[in-house]
Image (cartoon, helix red, strand yellow):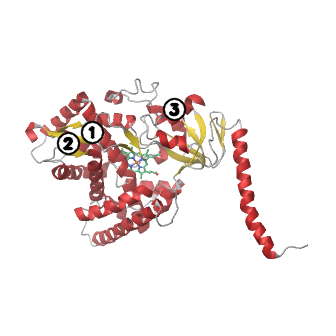
Amino acid sequence: MFSSPDHDNIMILVATPCLLLLYFVIKTLRERLFPDPQLPPGSLGWPLLGETLQFLPTRRTPKPERFVSDRMKKYNPQVFKTSLFGETVAVFCGPAGNKFLFSNENKLVNLWWPTSVKKLMKSSLSNVVGDDAKRMRKMLLTSLDRDALKRYIDRMDLVAQNHIRTHWEGKEELKLHPTINLYTFELSCRLFASIDDPTHISKLAHHFDIFLKGVIHFPIYVPGTPFYRASKAADAIKEELRLIARRRREALDKKMESHRKDLLSHLLVTTDASGKLLSESEIVDNMLMLLFASHDTTTSAMTCVMKYLAELPEVYEMVLREQLDIAKSKEAGELLKWEDIQRMRDSCNVVSEVLRMIPPIRGTFRKALVDFTYAGYKIPKGWKLYWSPDSTTKDPAYFPNPEEFDPSRYEGAGPAPYTFVPFGGGGRVCIGNEYSRPQILVFMHNIVKRFKWDLLIPDEKVTYDPMPAPSHGLPIRIQPHQSSA
Ligand code: HEM
């Protein structure tokens, strides 16, 4: 008896997914029951879920570093395998692991971001690797390097003063995390694109908030899902940025604006080695990516600085002394300059110690480009590779008494190479590394010289979602210093 073509097609339609599922189940069971001894030790957890359900909850505990440190002890202190978000992952640990990943970009490994990030910022740095990434990083860095930064300091100071007038003066209590959140967004709007109108800033902030909630999510483009809402919000922000960029291009062409006005102007005029400008979508997507990469990281770091300053009076006094010395050396109304930032050494050490104690980013991914061997184990092509500051920053071998807040660790030679890596490293190190410190220090200067504050919830827990934030928003009681009351 012969079957009809329709019948054959139905059989193929039913059999193909079944065979694929069977293949997947057999492969998954084999990997779990008979692990290849050449691969790094570790557990792949449950099929599909892997160890994601163990990884995510640790972020809401006081010791989120335990996901990595427990497995380093159990399996291997140099490298172990796990499975996260449906991907098989090798976690590279310790200074040697960090060094290996950071120095092998474009050779054995490439940066890897989740699909949702790539889709929302298609033409940005997050979507390019190899020579394209080198070209784009170089162009973006012209707007964030030391020369550009020197010109941003007085504007950062003005925005901080304005923020204090609006949100701090005359108040007895406030919630720090949401207040700082507003501040960092406003600062980025003003410094990146000279968006100064408060109504315009709040409109963008509204879209940005929705964007942040869905940017690292399952990339399901169906109405109602966080990713769908984030895509719509990203479209709205990009449309605004496109209009601003077009107007600015005209003004630059007519020589009505300086090409050094802000980050946007830099991006509009910077050319690569062959004389080519960034395209309009590259500019708009990169502006969104810079907002994304800078916002929660800086907000988290600033909030945690404020938390430690409230909890540790001797650290607060040290920072106050330094900032008052700088304030006294200025004329009335004179704004901060790059040279003043260089004098904030103790405050800068406090920022570093905060970044060690509570790193805003708990790690990023790379992808293996080829099969290679690391620490005696085979790492197959295509595996995702993860590094985390957690594998070194709480290890007493590199940071004695790691639970103690000690800003003096950064004096002299400071931490050993590849042990203190809150900004990552190598070819894909954070490009806001230089920019973020003055941003935090200018804020500290303005707040500390005018206020002291108490935490209304002592020992408020800091949890990750995905960036660290105090679980109740860090409410504080403010006391202005007598002289500035
Ligand atoms: C305290 C603040 C910040 C921290 C802790 C931080 C940390 C990081 C980390 C860990 C990475 C990944 C590096 C790697 O995978 O090796 C990164 C990437 C990045 N950061 Fe930051 N960041 C901060 C602020 C900023 C700011 C202010 C900007 C921009 C103005 C920025 C822009 C970027 C960009 C564009 C990337 C991607 C670089 C690439 O893919 O090549 N970050 N950051």
Q: Residue at x 24, y 49 (%)?
A: 153
Residue in the foreground of this view, choosing between 236 and 431: 236
- Is residue 31 shown left or right of residue 161? right
Whether label 2 lies within 8 Å of ligand 1 gets the answer no
Mark 2 or mark 3, whichever is nearer to me: 3
Give amino acid for label 2: Ile
Give amino acid for label 3: Ser
- SS category of the residue bearing label 3: helix
Residue in the foreground of this view, choosing between 436 and 306: 306
Quadrant into which the N terminus falls: bottom right
Give the labeled residue for mark 1. 306
Dot 1 or dot 2: first in sequence order is 1
Dot 3 or dot 1: first in sequence order is 3
- Is residue 375 shown left or right of residue 432? right
Whether label 1 lies within 8 Å of ligand 1 gets the answer no
The part of the image, by quadrant, that contains residue 321 is top left
| Image: 191 above or below 398 | below
Dot 1: within a 10 Å radius of its alpha carbon, few (fewer than 14), some, or many (20 or more) residues? many
Rendered image: mark on residue 447: 2
Q: Is label 1 in contact with label 2 (beta carbons under 8 Å)?
A: yes
Q: Position of residue 467 (x, y in %)?
A: 40, 46
Q: Position of residue 41 (x, y in %)?
A: 64, 35
In the picture as drawn, the residue positioned furthest to the right comes out as: 1
Rendered image: mark on residue 69: 3
Q: CA distance from mark 3 to mark 1?
A: 28 Å
Dot 3: within a 10 Å radius of its alpha carbon, few (fewer than 14), some, or many (20 or more) residues? some
Q: Residue at x 35, y 66 (%)?
A: 241
- SS category of the residue bearing label 2: helix
Residue 279 showing in the rendered view = no
Dot 2 or dot 3: first in sequence order is 3
